[in-house]
């Protein structure tokens, strides 16, 4: 008697019971024929879908089994969503895919398709001609994003285990539900699709036996090392070559994620995700629609690159590409981007932003080849999607073509997916495929469905089980018998069970160093060399082009510049050296930015590389994330720091996690410019005078730069661009608005806050490495160390001058980099005087000063310390702001108090 809850055992028992009750077809059908007159699927293709679906189902059962004895750490499964295998079949292996967490069958089918082990044809790439129906490139401002730095997918790094990641697999526990019958002798090792750098470079492909007949192509690898006997039939008794097909390889990938194995091929045990660089599957870790803006950005960049490079030429072996070479995409020229999500995610602000951006650009005539796939099971954990709401919402999105199908019917799903993907590929325009699905076994392992669903509702979903629906169709068409399908089901069950047992013995990440190895690698010598190389190009082969670009008026010959002018010149030089660099945001093109920082860039480099966006910070960052993933070097602007808070998760949950959760196989280099901080005169309020930086400093791996002086600003822009290009860094350049046009330091007209722009010959000598401070000596510089940044730098220098008149010598340390902090410089300069005054224009609670003081203590500093910081308040309008912000008088008095101790 089945219970009212779809437990793993119940789901397995019900499938067997229903399968046994199916009536045999009157005749056997040739697997090469369509399964029925109205179907585009052949019997062989339907069997491939069945194999992918069954592998996914057995993975879900194994996940619950592993969790039952504390060895599995992830139980969100794909049961009920296995129809997405048909979506994968309708796409090409080179189409980049960002998948939600119920995509097991999609992942399995993509692996088999890429390995050439399925009956679905892979159309040849259209290498030269634009896709039919693609409109010419729009000529109006904001017409797109050409330019790239070459491929970002570093497949040789994929899946490489950390040092010491060895260990033999072990047996554990009883077989999971579905693993009935005798073992088949199917050999198992590591995924055949893994790159050669994987330590256990496993075998591919046991021949696909069964009703379709004949073995499938496979690749053999002799068993060796730790995996010498992995997965071999116990009765084999020899060292025979082990064979494993792509479905088994995909299962191994997923199971490794479930048990947090350090050998998992994408995240390396850091998280359970669907992703593999060689399958063009981009890992997404928070799939509540936060990946949709990135997908739109990738589609926009992909299309612009296709128009620039219709032949689809690839960069060389260097994953960074060749600086100065034409931009290239890592994906085929006619690829489309696919991203999947659940029905509840339709309501998320990130989804709304993505749909709106795709439609907005489509309305302007700019093409974005993105296929959104909404898998609608009617539930968001326990909250129901109102009947008809999802369809009404998706149908109403302007500029997005709507397709739909019953996602539990493989024939209907495949037909709709082929039509939708074909439409997007031909027209290079966005579409949504709305699939009606079911959810079996609840949201995750701890979910008690009966708390919010009736027994009748659960039973109705069980009747629509997509795996059972595929089996029914196969039997009714005469392609397979029930016994043959049950044998395939059990074959996969035993295979998955054995692989699960094997991966249990694999090593886990065991140290902090292993965990953070790919978080944000820093290679300062390479970054410095990249800056020096750029200088050589600009001063040598590129000198004539540079002079022409600047209209004969080179910035180094223009005399002293302001902060804004220096940033502008550095961006212009950066775009010369990085053909894939694109600058975009609100008002940055035609107007040149609210403060003129990007003025003239569009005139120099065109509307395709410098363009205005719609007013939405989530979409601006999403465009940058997708562009970086596709091979560009994006430099988006968030118009004010206060506006960044609308879109913080695009930096925290999407940008900063990409390398971390892909073991460096994917990256999204980006330099985000943000005018910010306070002290604007005559214009302000908290939206234009925001001093909140805590959210940025809290993001692991993010580089946060705050230039105060014009000469530092230009050098730091070059460093950020080089760090993004070399290390794939995500950098945030917070530019103090109040210092943009400041000219004087001590007295009106002194011009002490201007600085000459360094020509290429001075770039290497003036390089500003990430995490290194700048120190100013005032007077004897022996009495007190003032640590500050941003607006605090000129204020502290003026305060130091006042103190110098009193006989007090000061060392003013401009942090310049707030993440990572220049700890070594801090400790050294603090120790010289033994007295430290931290001048922090952010707030006392959660401000930068807290981190500085902690770094000093951790670094062994034992002298006196004091802090001057802004009050815990939003910045008010007008003169009242001086009541809550740091002042020069407060700095001077703070230093005197410290000296009096």
Image (spheres, rainbow, N blue to C red):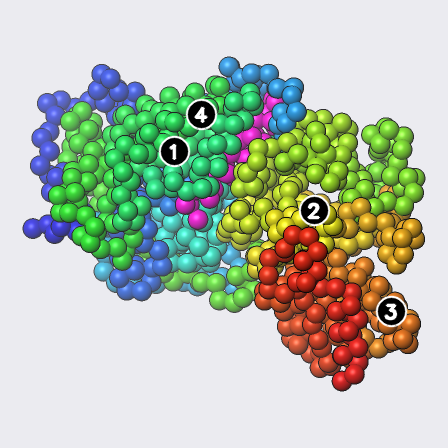
The residue lying toward the viewer, choosing from 887 and 474, is 887
Are the two marked residues, 3 and 2, in contact with CB atoms closer than 8 angstroms? no
Mark 3 and mark 1: span between their CA atoms? 64 Å
| Residue at the spot 63% in from the left edge and 65% down from the top edge | 871
| First reached walking from the N terminus: tag 4 or tag 1 | 1
Would you place residue 901 above or below residue 496 in this image?
Answer: below
| Residue at the spot 68% in from the left edge and 63% down from the top edge | 883
> Residue 14 — which label?
none
Of marks 2 and 1, the one in the foreground: 2
Residue 396 sits inside the magenta stretch: no
x, y percent for residue 264 = 45, 53
Quadrant where the C terminus is found in the figure: bottom right
Of marks 4 and 1, the one in the foreground: 4
x, y percent for residue 514 = 54, 62
| Residue at the spot 75% in from the left edge and 69% down from the top edge | 890
> Residue 373 — which label?
1
Q: Which residues are magenta?
A: 286-311
The residue lying toward the viewer, choosing from 852 and 27, is 852
Task: Rate crowding at label 4 as few (under 14), some (14 to 19) or many (20 or more) other CA atoms within 10 Å.
Answer: some
Location of mark 4 (residue) = 398
x, y percent for residue 130 = 56, 18
Q: Secondary structure at mark 2?
A: loop
Task: Rate crowding at label 3 as few (under 14), some (14 to 19) or many (20 or more) other CA atoms within 10 Å.
Answer: some
Location of mark 3 (residue) = 802
């Amino acid at each position: 008697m089945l219970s009212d809850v779809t437990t793993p055992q119940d789901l397995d028992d019900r499938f067997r019971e229903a399968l046994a009750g199916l009536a045999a077809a009157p005749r056997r059908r040739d697997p090469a024929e369509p399964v029925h007159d109205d179907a585009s699927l052949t019997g062989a293709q339907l069997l491939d879908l069945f194999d992918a679906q069954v592998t996914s189902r057995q993975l879900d059962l194994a996940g619950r089994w592993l969790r039952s004895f504390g060895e599995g750490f992830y139980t969100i499964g794909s049961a009920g969503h296995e129809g997405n295998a048909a979506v994968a079949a309708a796409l090409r292996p080179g189409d980049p895919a960002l998948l939600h967490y119920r995509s097991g069958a999609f992942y399995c089918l993509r692996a088999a398709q890429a390995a050439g082990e399925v009956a679905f044809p892979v159309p040849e790439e259209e290498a030269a001609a634009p896709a039919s129906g693609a409109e010419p490139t729009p000529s109006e401002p904001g017409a797109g994003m050409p330019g790239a730095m070459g491929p970002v997918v570093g497949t040789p790094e994929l899946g490489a285990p950390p040092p010491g990641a060895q260990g033999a697999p072990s047996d554990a526990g009883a077989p999971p539900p579905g693993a009935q019958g005798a073992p088949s002798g199917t050999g198992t090792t590591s995924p055949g699709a893994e790159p050669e750098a994987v330590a256990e470079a496993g075998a591919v492909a046991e021949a696909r036996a069964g009703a379709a007949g004949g073995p499938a192509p496979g690749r053999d690898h002799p068993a060796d090392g730790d995996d010498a006997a992995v997965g071999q039939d116990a009765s084999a008794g020899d060292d025979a070559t082990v064979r494993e097909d792509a479905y088994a390889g995909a299962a191994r990938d997923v199971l490794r994620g479930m048990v947090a194995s350090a050998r998992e091929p994408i995240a390396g045990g850091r998280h359970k995700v669907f992703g593999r660089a060689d399958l063009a599957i981009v890992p997404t870790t928070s799939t509540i629609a936060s990946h949709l803006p990135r997908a739109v950005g990738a589609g926009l960049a992909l299309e612009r690159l296709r128009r620039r490079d219709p032949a689809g030429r690839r960069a060389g072996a260097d994953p960074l590409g060749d600086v100065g070479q034409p931009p290239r995409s890592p994906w085929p020229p006619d690829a489309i981007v696919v991203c999947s999500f659940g029905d509840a995610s339709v309501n998320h602000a990130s989804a709304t932003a993505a749909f709106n951006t795709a439609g907005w650009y489509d309305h302007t005539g700019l093409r974005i080849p993105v296929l959104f796939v909404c898998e609608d099971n009617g539930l968001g954990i326990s909250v129901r999607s109102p009947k008809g709401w999802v369809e009404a919402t998706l149908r109403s999105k302007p500029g997005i073509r709507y397709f739909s199908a019953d996602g539990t019917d493989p024939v209907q799903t495949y037909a709709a997916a082929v039509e939708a993907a074909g439409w997007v590929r031909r027209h290079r325009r966005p579409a949504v495929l709305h699939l009606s699905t079911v959810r079996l076994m609840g949201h995750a392992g701890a979910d008690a469905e009966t708390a919010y669903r009736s027994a009748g509702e659960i039973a109705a979903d069980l009747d629509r089980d997509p795996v059972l629906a595929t089996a029914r169709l196969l039997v009714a068409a005469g392609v397979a018998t029930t016994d043959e399908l049950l044998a395939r089901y059990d074959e996969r069950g035993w295979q998955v069970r054995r692989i699960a047992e094997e991966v249990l013995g694999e090593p886990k990440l065991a140290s902090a160093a292993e965990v953070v190895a790919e978080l944000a690698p820093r290679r300062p010598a390479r970054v410095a060399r990249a800056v020096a190389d750029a200088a050589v190009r600009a001063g040598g082969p590129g000198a004539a082009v540079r002079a022409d670009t600047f209209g004969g008026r080179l910035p180094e010959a223009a005399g002293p510049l302001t902060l804004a002018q220096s940033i502008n010149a550095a961006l212009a030089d950066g775009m010369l050296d990085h053909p894939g660099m694109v600058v975009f945001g609100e008002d940055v093109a035609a107007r040149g930015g609210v403060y003129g920082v990007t003025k003239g860039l569009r005139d120099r480099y065109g509307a395709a590389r410098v363009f205005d966006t719609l007013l939405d910070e989530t979409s601006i960052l999403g465009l940058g994330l997708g562009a970086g993933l596709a091979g560009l070097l994006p430099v988006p602007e968030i118009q004010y720091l206060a506006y960044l808070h609308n879109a913080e998760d695009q930096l925290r949950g999407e940008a900063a996690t990409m390398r971390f959760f892909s073991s460096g196989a994917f990256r999204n280099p980006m330099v985000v410019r943000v005018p910010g901080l306070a002290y604007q005169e005559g214009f302000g309020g908290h939206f234009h005078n925001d001093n909140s930086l805590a959210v940025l400093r809290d993001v692991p791996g993010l580089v946060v730069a705050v230039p105060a002086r014009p000469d530092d600003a230009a050098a730091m822009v070059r460093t950020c661009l080089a760090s993004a290009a070399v290390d794939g860094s995500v950098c945030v350049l917070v530019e103090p608005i109040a210092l943009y046009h400041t000219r004087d330091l001590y007295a009106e007209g002194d011009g002490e806050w201007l600085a000459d722009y360094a020509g290429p010959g001075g770039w290497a000598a003036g390089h500003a490495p990430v995490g290194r401070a700048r120190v100013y000596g005032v007077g004897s510089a022996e009495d007190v160390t003032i640590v500050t940044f941003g607006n605090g730098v000129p204020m502290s220098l003026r305060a130091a001058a006042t103190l110098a008149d009193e006989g007090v010598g000061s060392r003013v340390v401009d942090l310049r980099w707030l993440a990572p902090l220049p700890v070594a410089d801090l400790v050294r300069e603090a120790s010289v005087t033994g007295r430290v005054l931290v001048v922090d224009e952010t707030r006392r609670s959660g401000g930068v000063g807290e981190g500085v003081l902690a770094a000093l203590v951790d670094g062994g500093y034992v002298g006196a310390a004091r802090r001057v910081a802004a009050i815990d308040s939003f910045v008010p309008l007008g003169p009242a702001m001086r009541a809550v912000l740091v002042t020069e008088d407060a700095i001077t008095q703070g230093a005197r108090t410290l000296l009096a101790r």
